[in-house]
Image: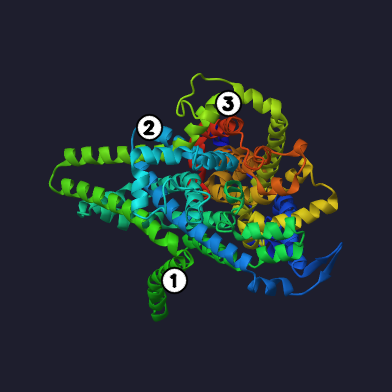
Amino acid sequence: MRSVRSAPAPVRRPAPPPGPGSLTTTQRRLGRDWRLAALFLAPTALLVGGLVLVPIARSILTSTTERHGAESVFVGLDNYLALVGDDQFRTGVVNSFVFTSYAEIFKVVLGLAAALLLHHRRRGRAVLTGLLLVPWVVPTVVTAFSWRALFDPIFGSVNTLLTDSGIGPLLASAHLVDSWPAGWLSDPSLAMPSVILVNVWKGVPFFTVCFLAGLKAIPADQYEAATIDGASAVQRFLHVTLPGLRHVITVTVTLSSIWTFNNFDLIWLLTQGGPGDVTAPYVLVAYSKAILQLQYGAGAAVTLVMLPIIGGLVFVLVRTLRQDDGTGRIRHTRAGRWRGTARKVLPWAVTVVFVGALAWASPHIFWKAAVVLGVILLVAAVAGRVVSVLQARGGRRASSVVSGIGSGVALAGLLAFVLGPLYWIAVTAFKSEGQVVTRMNDLWPTPWTLEQFGALFTNQPFGRWYVNTLLVSAASTAVALVCAVLAGYALARLRFRGAQGFTVTVLLTYVMPGALLFIPLYQLLIGLRLTDSLWSLVLTYPTFTLPFATWLLTGYFASIPAELEEAALVDGCTRVQAFGRVVLPLAKPGLLAVALFTLTNAWNEFLFAFVFITKDDYKTLPVGMQSMIAGDVVPQGQLAAASLLVSIPVVIMYAVGQRFLTEGLTAGAVKG
């Protein structure tokens, strides 16, 4: 940026912003920048208020009614009291708890392992990170279809590979599976672990990227000091890496737990809650009551009764995001010492209660998960111990070779786990129908053919679904980006009364699950006669894209040095000019990260489109692909071709913007 100080003659500068003594009465009451803040926050406030806060309030009122014919009758708390004896609801809550708990544990372990492997790798890190990110990028319907086909007990490749390698019979002999070959999604004892595995497969990339961003923020001199003090690799991990990642781990796990606990699309597409109700989450119970049975009050009660759990997670998230402001310091008093002791004891007490609840809720899964987790941790501990011993004996070259071989094997296994289902989709899309049915040339099409792509466009309105998804995703991303830029800047830079309350409100609406909103939004759209139209999706998608975009950009704008903007103000720029000429150019990584996230979320969204759209002409790709499955008839070749066409655009965008995505996470959401 050119400076006016380069002129030979002295330049008379405008006066700095007015101090407290020169503020008007209104400015002292509402804040110095209240006018500009009101202007910048108005679009976000209208959308968040009209599409989140008002529907939630309406949902609370709806939960106190019961439908009798065409009329709704006030019943008070009867819907809530009925849940006490509702076996379906209790089962749904337990299933959601089990599904979330195991998924988060394994996502943390595998995501941290992947991040450490990539962080210490000098060559090819960007390429490997991009490959590991693919499962998170591909639409959920693609994930569900690929794993559903792989888990098929007769035609799926999982049983075939495990049988040929001898691992399958070994699992049966160790009683990790009841019989072999296994019916992964049809066996009541294996359905929940299988669904958890798929969620872990899709979620590990997000954890890996967040942990990578957190590892980059840990000062290298801390590791150097620990090494000089004689700390081993395990000790450096326990005393440097984990404390340095504590903030990132807490934020990432809390956000992911909220998403996972309220998951609907993945479970619906894989099992529809079956067999029986062993995988049915509470969201599916709410959907069944409200949409299938048209009992809006009972369905709203199911979602609202979960608010205390969501509120607890949000409380943890808000406390974590405020850790860096200095308010969390403990004073060295008797009360401070008591709080310090409580902080040390409380996590262990919570862990004991959590493990006990998990063992009670899922005894048939608990010991199996403990065995798998124990094997993973044992292998990692042994590898770290071997490297430490070799380093202690002066064998740097030997320790480097062992470390390189170990990390290479671990990365190869991780890539095989991550890319295996995607490879299966790619090769299946280019098989003929005869090859798909007879399973000829399972791992390599012979010959390669475009037959499935032709059948896809001939037999299905796939082109129309594609255009619908493009229009809705582009419109919702544009709305979210424009509103979030204005609101994020106002919350990060402007001084006005109520900024903290507005920030908390945005954070609350961000973590509010779609499960809480789809019932009142459905009623709202019916009243506006907007169901079965693309406008219904354009109108409702900001409920989950806008709050996230605002939250991320608030953190990113706060990370930009305020001195740069102040210099522009001193040079004669207005606040709006400084925002446009200084702040926005520096915020390009954050803007790109927001655009990628919001576009991906809109592209992959299933629940709203599934509930609000029933006509083929207005379906988006996820809902359209799901409708291609008619009972037991699964057009695997056409679905594979559709999955490939759906995934390629998003994968390309993330490949191009990967560097900016990591930078945006580092400066924005991860730092809070």
Query: Who is closer to the viewer here, 98 or 434?
Result: 434
* As drawn, 419 above or below 249: above
Q: Which mark is residue 124?
A: 2
Q: Nearer the viewer, mark 3 or mark 2?
A: 3
Q: Does residue 87 show up?
A: yes
Q: Is residue 165 left or right of residue 47?
A: left
Query: Who is closer to the viewer here, 466 or 322?
Result: 466
Element at label 3: helix
* Quadrant of the rendered image containing residue 509: bottom right
Query: Residue tagged by mark 1?
Result: 353
What residue is at 70 percent from the left and 46 percent from the top?
Answer: 610
Quarter of the image for the N terminus: give it.
Answer: top right
Query: Residue tagged by mark 3?
Result: 433
* Quadrant of the rendered image containing residue 116: top left
N-terminal label among 3 and 2: 2
Q: Which mark is residue 229?
A: none
Q: Does residue 591 show up?
A: no
N-terminal label among 3 and 1: 1
Residue type at mark 2 is Gly
* As drawn, 149 above or below 299: above
Q: CA distance from mark 3 to mark 2?
A: 38 Å
